[in-house]
Image (cartoon, grey):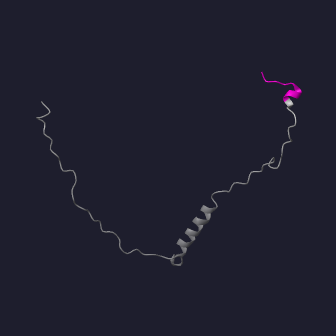
Amino acid sequence: MDAEDISYVKKPCCKDTVDVIEGQDDLTEKDFQSFEKDTYITLVSYVFSYTYLFETLAKPIIPHKNYKPPKIIKDIHVLDETYLI
């Protein structure tokens, strides 16, 4: 077959339709005081237990934080005659 004998047919791949799904238009909002007692206790206990679930890390103690090394006046390696070979 030659390349001239092959004919391409474009197939329709998309439809021009839109599907609309009906949703809930009216949402009910409850304030915190309108909860029942059991729900209120459960919610408060959950929040309380979740906040104390993680422990905070203590600040690390750095003992040499304010330490200042002495000033080097002379080369100690030369004075002690120690050389790395």
**In this picture, is 22 found above or below 60?**
below
Image location of residue 51, percent across then percent down:
62, 62
**In this picture, is 13 found above or below 79?**
below
* Quarter of the rendering occupied by the N terminus: top left
Image location of residue 34, percent across then percent down:
51, 78
Q: Is residue 84 left or right of residue 51?
A: right
Query: Furthest residue to the left?
Result: 5
Q: Is residue 73 left or right of residue 33?
A: right
Q: Is residue 14 left or right of residue 71?
A: left
Q: Residue at x 29, y 65 (%)?
A: 21
Q: Nearer the viewer, residue 79 or 64?
A: 79
Residue 81 falls in image quadrant: top right
Q: Is residue 46 left or right of residue 3?
A: right
* Quarter of the rendering occupied by the C terminus: top right
Image location of residue 41, percent across then percent down:
57, 71
Q: Residue at x 35, y 71 (%)?
A: 24
The residue range painted magenta reads 77-85
Q: Nearer the viewer, residue 85 or 59?
A: 85
Query: Furthest residue to the front?
Result: 73
Query: Furthest residue to the bottom?
Result: 34
Is residue 66 one of those drawn in magenta? no
Instruction: Report the label total.
Output: 0
Is residue 83 one of those drawn in magenta? yes
Residue 48 falls in image quadrant: bottom right
Q: Nearer the viewer, residue 76 or 63?
A: 76
Q: Residue at x 17, y 47 (%)?
A: 11
Q: Residue at x 64, y 61 (%)?
A: 52
